Amino acid sequence: MLNLPAIKKLCEAASEAPWHRNCGTINTRDGWLVASLSIRGPGSNRKADAEFIAQARTLVPQLLDKLEEAQGKLDAVEDYEHWRDSHMAAEPGYIPACLGPDCPSCKQATDALLARILKGE
């Protein structure tokens, strides 16, 4: 499993984005050298590798934001499913708390779920 807080901490500790590729080197936006690639051999492409590393400095934080947003939406759905299962359940011989398709509690919970998903919580 990914440790998103640890990845985020790495991103925050690195030199500010964006980074730029200059042939086989990667530089900060202020021109400071971050890395110099000396990859040699069949299939190696220093320029493409340097570009990948430079772009990763910006892309990894963006991916983390999207993952956190998706996790928030998944958490909202799981919370709703847990609520729904307990709301619809009934002890033997008892009527469930749910009133069916027109149940105000279900409508309120569904509206709250949609709001959380749309806000990305």
Image: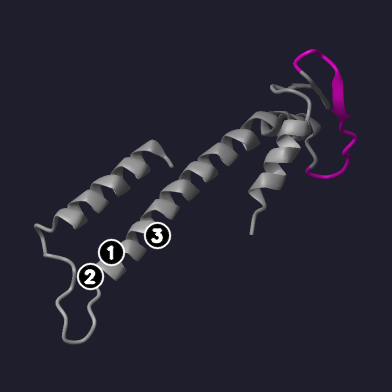
**Outermost residue to the top:** 30
Q: Decide if residue 47 is in sight here.
A: yes
Residue bearing mark 3: 78
- Residue at mark 2: 88
Q: Residues within 10 Å of mark 3 (few under 14, many from 20)?
A: few
The range drawn in magenta is: 29-43
Residue 83: x, y in percent?
32, 62
Q: Residues within 10 Å of mark 1 (few under 14, many from 20)?
A: some
Q: Are marks 3 and 2 in contact (CB under 8 Å)?
A: no
Q: Amino acid at mark 2?
A: Met
**Of the pair 113 and 65, the residue shown nearer to us:** 113
Are circles 2 and 1 on residues that touch, CB within 8 Å?
yes
Where residue 40 appears, as percent x and y from the top left, is 89, 40
Q: Where is 12 relative to 72, above or below?
A: above
Check if mark 3's residue and mark 1's residue have beta carbons within 8 Å: no
Task: Using the image as rendered, state which of residue 36 and residue 113 is in the foreground.
Answer: 113
Q: Secondary structure at mark 1?
A: helix
Label 1 sits on residue:
84
